[in-house]
Amino acid sequence: MSNEGLLSEVNKRRTFAIISHPDAGKTTITEKVLLFGEAIKSAGTVKGRGGTGQHAKSDWMEMEKERGISVTTSVMQFPYQDALVNLLDTPGHEDFSEDTYRTLTAVDSCLMVIDSAKGVEARTIKLMEVTRLRDTPIVTFMNKLDRDIRDPIELMDEVEDVLNIACAPITWPIGSGKLFKGVYHILRDEVILYQSGQGHMIQEVRTVKGLDNPELESVIGEDFAEQLREEMELVQGASNEFDMEMFLAGELTPVYFGTALGNFGVDHILDGLVEWAPKPQPRESAERQVEPAEEKFSGFVFKIQANMDPKHRDRIAFMRICSGKYQKGMKMRHVRIGKDISVSDAVTFMAGDRSHADEAFPGDIIGLHNHGTIQIGDTFSQGENLRFTGIPNFAPELFRRIQLKDPLKMKHLQKGLLQLAEEGAVQVFRPLRNNDLIVGAVGILQFDVVVARLKSEYKVEAIYEPINVATARWVACDDQRKLDEFSKKAHDNLALDGGDNLTYIAPTMVNLSLAQERFPEVKFMTTREH
Ligand code: GDP
């Protein structure tokens, strides 16, 4: 393929994720976005609500259904206008934040969704911190305008103050709740009217061109027309204008208003994303920066997921393509283990359905069938020894010893735990001094998920016991002799994690600081890059 051909494929792509606090409306927006992508004909099937019997592909886990939380990450690709959009879904519950963080390393922009009755919530703050690590551009959607919302100016002020990002309104709401009339699109100078009860379809919209158009009075009423004109004067005087450079630097966010449930405003965001959000960006590797239009293929794995579809009992490694082109049957190098493999059955995620890809381009996500050799953070290339950086693992804060109900199933338990650790569902530590298996988690819910999955996928019944571990740190030292000395002295507190990395398991925080004082050359790390 000519370089120009590759470049035009790169330019078409927009790869983004939605970040929000649980219940702000991420799932509902995903539904509507797919509707616009004409991926699904009638919205309402993503979470399988309302007993329609239709469940989306991401809804594969019983536990998720029971608890109404989304613990999986899936990928959906669909065309919108001239662009090809890749939407990466992230688990909403905070206990699965590691997965979310890693997914955010694989996108070029994010859509932030805010519940306009509530404003900025805790999880949004955390997620924004993560996007800051890479200065990811953010588009904002103020959702649930069909309810009584907080004052829109106050909402934008809160985003600016709490999240430290400038807001540039692109649309402006006219009323809210029962009196929600629609939005004024500032850049198009056009009032777009809202009709309730049309949430399941792509709506015929009625617009009124121009703020001074006398027709406005007759469609939204005199009071609203007057109020809108006054507010617009105020807003345009007091708020920021959209600025491309600041947007791309993650310093300014375009803001849209609407209701996901009413399917109003979602197309405005998509228009904005397609027009402004960055195409696939260059990526840092330990060796050099990699440009998407480079001829040679490269990509990194940001997530591994087991048994997505009960019909395909395998594990899928999700890879973000960084450069070049994936072509069915091609050879790629698995850099960490130095092996060349032929890949003929990569999975793509067109409209949420798994299908086999013949080709894929930078910005796209492909799924590789994994038989245990691929780990999160692994780089694949076409011969060059590249290692992409910046995919984090976080030191767990909660620990339990895991025990079998049937001791004969030890092999199954080990295998299951190591696989779950490899896909990042949980972390596992094997102390050097005994045969314990310690499970470490960032959030408490991870423990339940692990036991449920061990039972359903590996047929082992396990239970937890408390264990006296306060914290864990990955250890490293430039001086091998010092590391050996440390390993001998601290032997009883050392363990190997799922990837055989040396870890210090501290019974108390005091114990950790003593170890740090005694061995100043040793690094004790709270995050580990894959
Ligand atoms: P998620 O947890 O962020 O994925 O949020 P969901 O999309 O599941 O939405 C949470 C709840 O808010 C659900 O009951 C939705 O029906 C509701 N919801 C989402 N968008 C809107 C909206 O625009 N207006 C109203 N009134 N409810 C909404």
Image: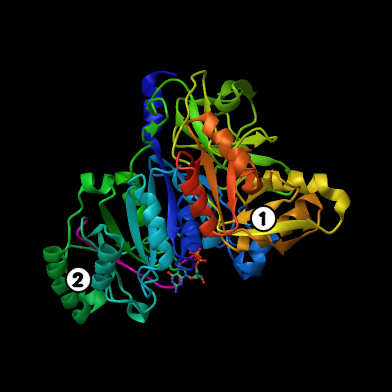
Label 2 residue near ligand 1, CB within 8 Å: no
Residues at discs 2 and 1 in contact (Cβ within 8 Å): no
Residue 227 occupies quadrant? bottom left
* Tag 1: amino acid: Trp
Q: Residue at x 20, y 49 (%)?
A: 243
Residues packed near mark 2 inside 10 Å, few (<14), some (14 to 19) or many (20 plus): some
Q: Measuring from the top left, give residue 499's x and y in whole percent.
A: 62, 39
Q: Which residues are magenta?
A: 188-201
The residue singled out by tag 1 in the image is: 60
Q: Residue at x 73, y 49 (%)?
A: 310
Q: Measuring from the top left, give residue 130's x and y in whole percent.
A: 40, 52
Please name whichever residue, 37 or 255, is drawn nearer the observer in this view of the structure.
255
- In the image, residue 351 sits, relative to residue 30, either above or below, namely above
Please name whichever residue, 462 or 185, is drawn nearer the observer in this view of the structure.
462
Q: Measuring from the top left, give residue 353's x and y in whole percent.
A: 60, 45
- In the image, residue 96 sits, relative to residue 109, either above or below, namely below
Q: Which mark is residue 11?
A: none
Q: Measuring from the top left, give residue 385's x and y in whole percent.
A: 49, 21
The residue singled out by tag 2 in the image is: 215
Position of the N terminus by quadrant: top left
Q: Is residue 162 left or right of residue 398?
A: left
Magenta span: predominant SS is loop
Q: Is residue 38 left or right of residue 448?
A: left
Label 1 residue near ligand 1, CB within 8 Å: no
* Tag 2: amino acid: Glu
